[in-house]
Amino acid sequence: MQAPNPWPVAVLASGRGSNLQALHQASLLGGLPIRIVGVFSDKPDSGAIAYAHRHGIPHRAFAAKAYPSREAFDQALMTAVAEIQPELIICAGYMRIISDAGIALAPCPMINIHPSLLPLYPGLHTHARAIAEGRKEHGASVHLVNNILDGGRVLSQAKVPVLAGDSPERLAERVLSREYPLLIETVRSIISGRITLNNSPQAQVLYLHDDNSRLD
Ligand code: GRF
């Protein structure tokens, strides 16, 4: 069955929601053929939930303390996500680890944006770790979500230089400015079929051009 056009997508976010905003604005102005049909968060006070509220996007926040276990939390989350029938789930700064049970309940493929050139630096503090190890290059990756933390197949990456004297904050800003076009172009390529979401070992990582224009 063909996916509807625009694609209905769910966004999971825990933080300020700037990647959510980039996706939403691209869907409104930039010709990205998605409709954000739900925003879900583990942080009721997050910027992402506030953004969804301001823009009339259906949203739900789940407080972890209301659930007896990670699995129970994820079951509630994924049940709500399934209700809106997305074709794709985009984790855009979703900081809570999803249990195996939660991943198994996901109603469609799920992708995540991570601020490092995976497989380097899964997990937290990626910018500080890249600086501490003297890397000349750093960046962001979009990958399939599976039950290994930041370990699913890498779909696309954008690189930035690490400059002399960089602080983790300055480097994070440089990476973030490339995360938005990376995520948008990756979703565009998934919808066009250029990026496939199976686990083919032959599939290549696509790189975002320096001018943010497209993936190659
Ligand atoms: C981004 O750097 C994302 O890669 C990471 O968390 C940050 C989220 O930023 N996982 P925002 O909430 O989209 O502004």
Image (cartoon, grey):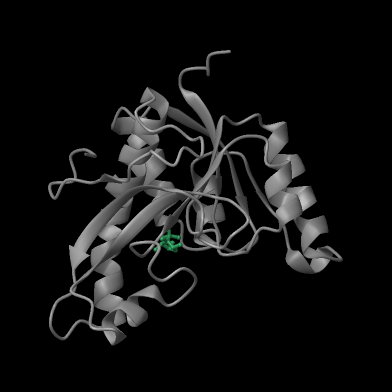
Up/down of 48 relative to 161, above or below: above
- Which corner quadrant holds the C terminus? top left
Q: Quadrant of ligand 1?
A: bottom left
**Residue 187 screen position, x and y as percent:** 39, 36
Quarter assignment of residue 203 = top left
- Residue at the far top in the pictured view: 1
Between residues 76 and 116, which one lies in front from this camera angle?
Answer: 116
Q: As drawn, is 17 to the left or to the right of 38?
A: left
Q: Residue at x 65, y 29 (%)?
A: 85
Up/down of 132 relative to 56, above or below: below
Q: As drawn, is 52 to the left or to the right of 192?
A: right
Q: As drawn, is 72 to the left or to the right of 212?
A: right
Quarter assignment of residue 193 = top left
**Residue 112 screen position, x and y as percent:** 48, 51
Q: As drawn, is 165 to the left or to the right of 57?
A: left
Q: Residue at x 28, y 32 (%)?
A: 30
Up/down of 100 relative to 193, above or below: below
**Residue 120 screen position, x and y as percent:** 38, 68
Q: Residue at x 59, y 51 (%)?
A: 146
- Which corner quadrant holds the N terminus? top right
